[in-house]
């Protein structure tokens, strides 16, 4: 009960910040078309960017995996209040059940979101989960570049999480789609992870450069 109440307070604080942000949102035409046709897709991002991105949960009809930890319970409450659907689990606890739940949400028409270097890092190293879901679902992967001109940073967090400050300028770019994965694709193939890592780093640098010039 306490976790739900704390999550509700965090949601209210987040919303009070969010409504002051000046956001530039860039989407490729193929992603816009899928939104218009209400077709699901997969979003890939670095773990630390989630507080800048969760505001889009309702726009993208997001379903996502949330950790079974106490912090995960808080995030679960916030995400649901923002319009997302969630399934609980991680790579260490409840992982198979969470993956099945995520695939069920996708088949029901939800898009899904992945912090691809989670749940515990190492940071900026892509794990195979996003490719496993893409292979099983047949959905395209789009990846993010996120930049913010002012934020609260949490240096003790392994994932370099930040929260954009009130009146911050945010630039959120989506790129893709990633190459199609077939039934023959090995989701654990190192070249897949390396390619997506390079794409995510390039998108981040592009967003940072654009917001610096604005």
Image (tube, grey):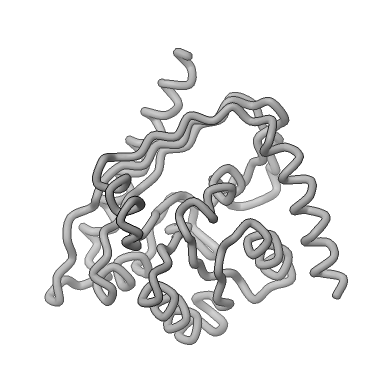
Q: Position of residue 171 (x, y in %)?
A: 48, 30
Q: Residue at x 81, y 69 (%)?
A: 3
Farthest-out residue, front: 37
Total of numbered circles in the picture?
A: 0
* Residue 149, placed above or below residue 163: above
Q: Position of residue 160 (x, y in %)?
A: 60, 45
Q: Quadrant of the N terminus?
A: bottom right
The quarter of the picture where residue 184 lies is bottom left
Along the line of sight, the residue nearer the viewer: 202 or 88: 88
* Residue 68, placed above or below residue 163: below
* Residue 160, placed above or below residue 107: above
The quarter of the picture where residue 114 lies is bottom left
Q: Residue at x 32, y 45 (%)?
A: 32
Q: Is residue 180 left or right of residue 119?
A: left
* Residue 208, placed above or below residue 63: above
Farthest-out residue, top: 213
Q: Residue at x 52, y 70 (%)?
A: 65
Q: Residue at x 49, y 76 (%)?
A: 91
Q: Is residue 136 left or right of residue 43?
A: left
Q: Position of residue 67 (x, y in %)?
A: 61, 71
Q: Position of residue 10 (x, y in %)?
A: 78, 53
Q: Is residue 41 left or right of residue 104?
A: left
């Amino acid at each position: 009960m306490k976790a739900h109440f704390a999550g509700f307070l965090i949601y209210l604080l987040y919303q009070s910040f969010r409504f002051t942000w000046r956001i530039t949102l860039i989407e490729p035409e193929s992603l816009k078309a899928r939104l218009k046709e209400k077709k699901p897709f997969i979003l890939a991002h670095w773990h630390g960017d989630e507080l800048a991105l969760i505001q889009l949960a309702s726009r993208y009809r997001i379903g996502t995996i949330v950790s079974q930890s106490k912090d995960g319970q808080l995030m679960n409450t916030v995400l649901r209040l923002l319009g997302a659907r969630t399934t609980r689990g991680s790579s260490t606890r409840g992982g198979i059940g969470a993956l099945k739940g995520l695939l069920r949400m996708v088949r029901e028409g939800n898009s899904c979101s992945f912090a691809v270097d989670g749940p515990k890092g190492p940071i900026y190293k892509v794990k195979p989960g996003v490719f496993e879901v893409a292979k099983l679902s047949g959905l395209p992967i789009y990846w993010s570049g996120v930049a913010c001109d002012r934020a609260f940073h949490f240096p003790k967090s392994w994932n370099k999480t930040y929260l954009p400050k009130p009146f911050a300028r945010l630039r959120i770019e989506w790129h893709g789609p990633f190459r199609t994965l077939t039934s023959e694709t090995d989701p654990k193939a190192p070249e897949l992870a390396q390619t997506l890592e390079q794409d995510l780093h390039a998108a981040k640098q592009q967003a940072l450069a654009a917001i610096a010039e604005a």
